[in-house]
Amino acid sequence: MVEVIKKGAYLVDGQIVWAENAAGQESPDAAREKTIAYSILRKHDKSTDPKKMRLKFDALISHDITFVGIIQTAKASGLTKFPIPYAMTNCHNSLCAVGGTINEDDHAFGLSAAKKYGGIYVPPNQAVIHQYARERLAGCGKMILGSDSHTRYGAYGCMGVGEGGGELVKQLLENTYGVAAPEVVMVYLEGKPRKGVGPQDVAIALVGATFPNGDVKNKVLEFVGPGVKELSCDFRIGVDVMTTETSCLTSIWQTDEAVRAYYENVGRPEEYQELNPGNGAYYDSVVKIDLSKVECMIALPFHPSIAYTIHELQADPEGILAKVEEACNKQLGGKVTLDLRRNIVDGKVTCDQGVIVGCSGGMYENIVEAAAILKGQSIGNGYFDMSVYPSSTPISLAITKNGTAATLMEAGCVMKPAFCGPCFGAGDTPANGTLSIRHATRNFANREGSKPGNGQIAAVALMDARSIAATARNGGVLTAATDIDYDEPTAEELTYRYDGGVYAKRCYEGFGKADPDAQLRYGPNIKDWPKMPKLEEDLLVRLCAVIHDPVTTTDELIPSGETSSYRSNPIGLSEFALSRRVPEYVGRSKAVRALEEAREAGEVPAEAASVLEKVGGDLKRTTIGSCVFANKPGDGSAREQAASCQKVLGGFANICYEYATKRYRSNCINWGIVPFTLDKSAAFPYEDGDWVYVPGVKAAIAGGVEDIPAKVIRGDGSVEDIALKCAGLTADERLILQEGCLMNYYAAGYGKE
């Protein structure tokens, strides 16, 4: 089904030639430039160093969890107008169910910012962030930077990168995005999917094969091969958007007449160009996918990589669910117990809810296929229910006009507007202890809206829309779509007829029309960032959360769901930091922040002074802050608040063995949190409350020193040496850390290119 081959290869005359057999080919560095990825990256690269890219993007996109903070940061850093198209969609805080008026206040702020700075504003429920970008911003050979982790448009010949808000701020201020020249992985597609197999099945198989060992982390996936032409554009983008879950940097696909037809359909034919790798292009590794062998898949809690075929799960539900249950309960830390096996009834796995939603599930073809499976059927009047969220109003219009929506409603499904909520725990929260199957992007803990801290837990498994519909047709009993006899939609029925008239009527297209006299509209929950202190010569941090889980997600660092209503209030949101994983973290961090505030006021905080006395430190030249230790933090969302909340609470460092994603590490740096790492063989036996003293840290960072000795002051007063690393910082990143955060960096006059 999926084979990961960890060796270099050339693509010669459309065939894979392994590097050891490629006599006469160019060197890997020279031949890598022939990939589609590098042909696009180099056109956007402003660096003179081929190993360290500095990219400028063609467009930006954010949603209503992130755009307020981005604009507030950019405004504080000198923003006057948007230099490139910047679209602000309203697809995450659309329910307005928490906190009174505050969500709609954010929307009004977004429209006022579009008017003032010359931006694009997409009102609530018109489109999810990525569908708007696909229909209105993507173009072959272009690059888009988005403040959402699933910023992926490679199937349309456009490289999308998901990052934290600080990186968008840099683009708004006409700075660049720094990234080491990435490796490129060939994803070679062959064969043709069987009836009933959809894009989520291919995606789950791909994620399951590549994520666990980090095979493609921070690399570019380039999709080529004869199997590409066997996939529609909807199918391709359904796979592509899920590449985020492999932990790759971005993705790109070869383009063809299907992509040309897509751009013609959405009224932008000029955006098409044929993209193919040059003959002899070099790839650092290969992933081969035989589409004809892909089965209907399910990703069990709590990660898209916990991949099984549905048939495997049907054959051994007790054994597989017991294994997954054990891992989930270990991750939940004893706060609540997940009982997945309660969903086994008469030897079969039963589900209580089906949801087709968002940038992965809510595509036109997925919905049409689901309707074909449910035509003339019923989801029943038992516990199982099903919701369908088209990803844009144009898709909603198309399925309304051709009767697809009516077919689904006749079967008992509920049709809903474009909204990302079920992807991150806001909307369609299932009952306690139940299993929801979703064609969505993620199934992390709490992504279904439960609150383990309050004794509530449910679970999400990811599946393709086709198998969700098959399960619905079978009354909630887990069913692979390949096991259902249904009439496949015709080519005519699968043809999406885009009508962008509603965008023209409802969206504000203000790029190039900045009005400096326009006033930003604020609400009582929209707050400016608090003052961020600079880094002194030395650093003393207290461990306020020590987490030894294999991976710590951004959902744990700052929970998703109803907390998103407070995303425009940095201080208010910080109260939720690590609340579902280490509830004591906020109080501990505040206590440390109070010590730094006292020091800045010229006082002598006794506790910090006592600790420094043990290591010969000088309080006057030492920043005091909090610190989080985690084995591998930052898997998941691009949301910068996972780092900014730590900073607001007084955070000044993180220590880990490895950062799960580049974007979380970038977020830490942009918020002035020193991203320390440890050698993977080093032990970390330290506990909450221990202190870490890093003398000369500012000079070390300024000088590019990567190995930085430090000392740990234990609770019993003993002192131990520890070897920290701070590797791979760019010159700009070193300055940002010294200044204390990105806003301070710009205020100091840096970043003008």
Image: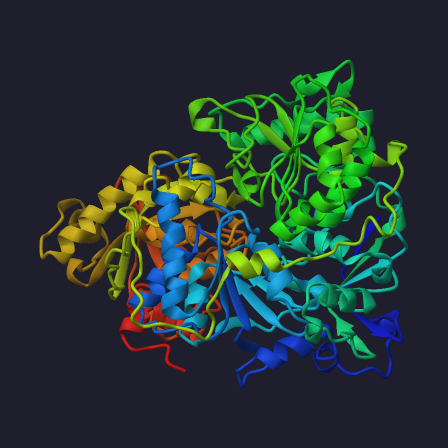
Instruction: Find residue 410 and report its image quarter.
Output: top right
Q: Is residue 357 left or right of residue 83?
A: right
Q: Is residue 291 left or right of residue 525?
A: right
In the image as oriented, which residue stretches furthest toward the left?
603
Number of marks = 0
Check the image and tell me how it is coloured. rainbow
Query: From this viewpoint, is residue 212 visible?
Result: no
Residue 94 versus residue 65: which sits nearer the camera? 94
Residue at screen point 25% across, 64% down: 534
Asked if residue 147 is positioned above or below residue 423 in the image, the reply reads below
The reply, left or right, for residue 199 in relation to residue 728 is right
Does residue 368 appear anywhere in the picture? yes
What residue lies at 74% left-to-right and 68% top-to-bottom? 264
The one nearer the camera, 120 or 248, is: 120
Q: Is residue 189 left or right of residue 681?
A: right
Where is residue 530 shown, x and y percent of the image?
A: 25, 55
Return the x and y of residue 196 as percentages of the image width and height.
84, 40
Q: Residue at x 49, y 29 (%)?
A: 333
Out of 745 and 441, give the one closest to the viewer: 441
